[in-house]
Amino acid sequence: MSAPPASSAPETETCPLFSPDLDKLDTPDAIAAYLKGWHRRINGPEAIQHGGTGAILEAHNTALVDAVLRRLFALAVAHASPADTAPALAIIATGGYGRRELAPFSDVDLTFVPAHEDDDFLNIIIKDMFQMVMDVFLYGAGHKVGYAYRLIGDLGQLDHQTQTALLDARFLCGDRALFREFRSAFRAQLLTADFLFQKWAERQNVLARHGGDEVYSVEPNVKESAGGLRDIQNAEWVGEARARVGLSRVWPALTDMGALSDEEAAQIRLARAFLHTVRCALHIVSGEARDTLTAEKQEAVAALLAYSETPDVPAVETFMRDYFTHAARARRIARKVIAHCLDSELTLTPALASVGRRLVVTDAAAAARDAALPLHAAELAQAYYLDTRGPLEDEIRRFLEACPAPADSAYAGRVFARLLTQSRSVADTLDRLEEWGALAWLLPEFGPLMVLIPYDAAHEYTVGAHSLRVVRNLESLKTTADPRLTDYKRIVAEISFPEVLYLAGLIHDVGKQWPQGRHEETGAEAARRIAERLGWDRERHDKLAFLVRHHLLMAETSRLRDLSLDETLREFTRQIPDLDCLNMLYLLTYADTNAVGAGVWTEVKAKFLSELYYRAEAVLASPAPLEAGETVPPPHNLARQRDRIKKQLAAQNLPPDLIHEHTRNLPAQYLLNTPLEEMYLHIAMIGRLRETFQPIVDFRHEYGADFTEMTLAAFDDPRPGLLAKITGVLYAHDINVHSAQVFTRASSVRIALDTLWVDYRGRPLTPGKRDEVSASLRRVLLGEIGVGALLQKHKKPLKEQAIFSAIIDDASSERFSLLEISAPDEKGVVYRLARAVAHCGWNIHAARLSVWGSRARDAFYITDLDGKKVPADAAQCLTSFLPAATSARRKR
């Protein structure tokens, strides 16, 4: 036998009651045994083996389940009322069960429809029947059951998946008149265009997870792959909704509409019958619900369907040839049917329709009466993937000329919020609104930004274009496959108010158009006015204003502050209202930085931003926030921390005396913030330093990162300037410095442990470059060559660093003064500034560099030679001998 019959059983076919004994059974256990026995008998291999079809087998399974459920319903009614009262309750079969397409191990989907919600009699029946259904099907026979409770009044709020299930609803038992009323109400409220476009979009998403539009997968999914049953079912659902007919009449109706020819209708029926037979066979050979034709199962299914072997062609090859032939036809015809239905005229609103999947105005008078026509048009295009080019754009422009401002801003605000909360195409929709002029119509504050040149030289786009890119960056996080953005993707999925985040991205720089005051502050005031005008509630007001006011806070803190200090976290988290605001600010900071221009967002920025986020998250989630002045744990807690670290390091087989010396002579800041594996590395490096009396340098970088973490262990120089020597060597070898952390081990012989985050031309240091840097560092630190001579050797200019400003903050930190210097971004700027700091006799404990356009901002945590803070007025030491730089920036 070469192939199974392709004919289908009539769709209304049922089986006679399998045994009259069913009506005599009155316990769940007995009925479950009945169900299991008959299910095993009708789903044996012989059901398919000798020419049986999937349609017949599915009809038998459906009839068996129908009979059992009707018996359970009769028992539930009898339990509730021995007086044989007819309940106003309909039990409906939905989904594949409703279509009588119950494969051997398919789920059984039921819907309970009561005439009234608060009816004790009906509630007793529903609860009793539900419990018996679970006892019989799930616990007794091992069948999965889907359960729903629907009121006629709820039909207007259903999602399209539920609508699809109800489209195939079939009366099972109970009140038939109530079922007819339910079905009539459902069809009346079904919005044809919305349903069609939702089914199309849903199918594209499913296909993307199952091999895309490729029919010829070597291990296809009979149900979900291209050309599978779901393609045929989608065509049927779309046809039912478009033609307003039931499943039994859908193919003739589609043929009459011209969606396909008579020959194509016959071909897709044959494909449908074949695929149902294959699916049933696959369930039987698997012994469970399995829809993927794996290589192993292909052979088993071919054998069950009695495909013949020939000397030249194995049976499985003939079987799969038939499968691909039917699947290819099913895919082509189903796609043609759906395209025909979607391309026909579909009314969307009184003013708008889709014709050929292009949005058009069908009633100019209705369009003129639509108070939010541009937003409605954008919303429909966004939801249904519609083309808006052509006459619609002209209609929108005429509308905006006639109505220069929204007639009802609060109503427009609600529609706008819906646009911003959609799962897709938010950025495209905002771009479309901007092109139409409708974004400035809704948000007049945004209009001037599209032509406003930013005064920050780092920006490559106008303020408005940059802002639209920020929104695009935010939206792209939802679907990114970049492993470096995994955390952002997770967080964006948890945001409670996406509309607030997107609007903040759009207007975060709105204050740049007003020259007075800081643009963050003027922008926050404008944000409140905008939220008020759009009718948003107080919570959204506050969050929007917060994000605009503080959109630079996280970027500047992560780039220019020592994140290991409690006071840094305390000052930062003091300004963050809650975790939701922290999450949105984190995402906005990434999106904003990444939208400035090429090369502005780097892995180093990502590292420090992520570090700040997770440290702040821990503080905000803690029930006991950091107290003012609490820069280290209490002595007893610090002692416990040291003891814990000692035990953990001892497990690494390090000598106890080395562990004790290391943990005793480094500050709490080091012990609380240094990972254990780094401490192990530092102890080992110090051991080598003592053995060789030469500086020890270690380089590490994470896979995929574009920077290198360089750690140096060296005997400390009693005079300030060690960091200047290190950065001078790096400058000589064209190494960029992003950050430095300096610790000194205060034992009898002072040892410096300096960690710097560096890169070479935007990439990690190559092995050759590491060797060059290591060699030069040893020569300089051992006094064999001076930094000046090394720079001359590498043809680097020797000059003082011009600066824009130098300010010392001696109040923010308990232990250090914070020196902030703004200077032109030039090669060697970190070295020259570190040298200038050393010239003033100050020790550097940490350094951060942030480059933005043509400017560098450096932050140094400093003390004087005695370890005391440097007073604010000492900044004149730098300004007295460093030349003043002139700015070429635009002023605003």
Image: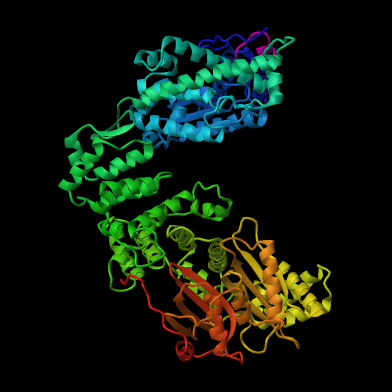
Return the x and y of residue 337 as percentages of the image width and height. 41, 21
Q: Is residue 51 magenta?
A: yes
Specify start and end residues of the magenta stretch as a single range.
Answer: 45-53
| Residue 119 percent location from the top left of the image | 43, 35
**Residue extending furthest bottom?**
866
* Quadrant into which the C terminus falls: bottom left
Tally of numbered discs: 0
Is 567 on the left or on the right of 25, as rendered?
left
Q: Nearer the viewer, residue 515 or 287?
A: 515
Report whether residue 560 is seen.
yes
The answer to whether 870 appears left or right of 405 in the picture is: right
Above or below for 590 versus 756: above
Q: Quadrant of residue 709?
A: bottom right
Provide residue 647's location: percent of width, then percent of height: 79, 72
Q: Residue at x 35, y 28 (%)?
A: 192
Q: Is residue 312 left or right of residue 183?
A: right
Q: Residue at x 71, y 20 (%)?
A: 299
Q: Is residue 547 above or below residue 151?
A: below
Q: Quadrant of the N terminus?
A: top right
**Looking at the image, is 335 positioned above or below residue 867?**
above
